[in-house]
Image (spheres, helix red, strand yellow):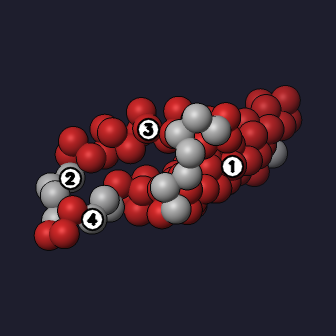
């Protein structure tokens, strides 16, 4: 059983790192969008390419608020935090229960 437990710990750790990195990518996207950065820049294209598929789905589900404020990055940030706190911790707990 320790092999399965170690595998679950590894999956939880990789998932935690990926979610942490994606959260920083979303934060970078918000910062770049505040400054109207050059869309031809490779870094800006990466940020938009990595976040737009997720943000677009959230925008379709959210109503538009007064002033046209885009709340989709905030919703994605909350979802990433939820996944880190619930899914990753559940995987760790399951792995420890198998030991």
Residue depth check, mark 1 versus mark 4: number of the one nearer the observer: 4
In space, the residues marked 1 and 4 are separated at their CA atoms by 25 Å
Q: Is residue 59 visible?
A: yes
Residue depicted at x 43% and y 38%? 52
- Tell me if label 2 and label 1 are in contact, CB under 8 Å: no
Mark carried by residue 52: 3
Q: Indicate the quadrant containing the N terminus: top left, top right, bottom left or bottom right.
A: top right
Q: Position of residue 98 (x, y in %)?
A: 74, 42
Q: Tell me the residue at 84%/29% (across/down).
A: 3
Whole-Å distance between the Cαs marked 2 and 3? 15 Å
Q: Position of residue 20 (x, y in %)?
A: 67, 53
Closer to the eye: label 4 or 2: 4
User: For the view shown, which residue lies furthest in the bottom direction?
Assistant: 66
Q: Give the spatial CA distance, label 1 vs label 3.
A: 16 Å
Label 2, label 1: how far apart the Cα atoms are:
24 Å
- Mark 2 vs 3, N-terminal side: 3
């Amino acid at each position: 059983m320790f092999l399965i437990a170690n595998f679950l710990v590894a999956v939880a750790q990789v998932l935690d790192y990926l979610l942490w990195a994606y959260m920083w990518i979303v934060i970078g996207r918000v910062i770049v969008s505040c400054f109207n950065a050059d869309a031809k820049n490779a870094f800006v294209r990466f940020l938009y390419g990595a976040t737009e598929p997720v943000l677009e789905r959230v925008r379709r589900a959210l109503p538009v608020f007064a002033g046209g404020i885009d709340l989709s990055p905030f919703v994605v940030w909350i979802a990433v935090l939820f996944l880190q706190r619930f899914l990753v911790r559940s995987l760790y707990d399951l792995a420890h229960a198998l030991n």
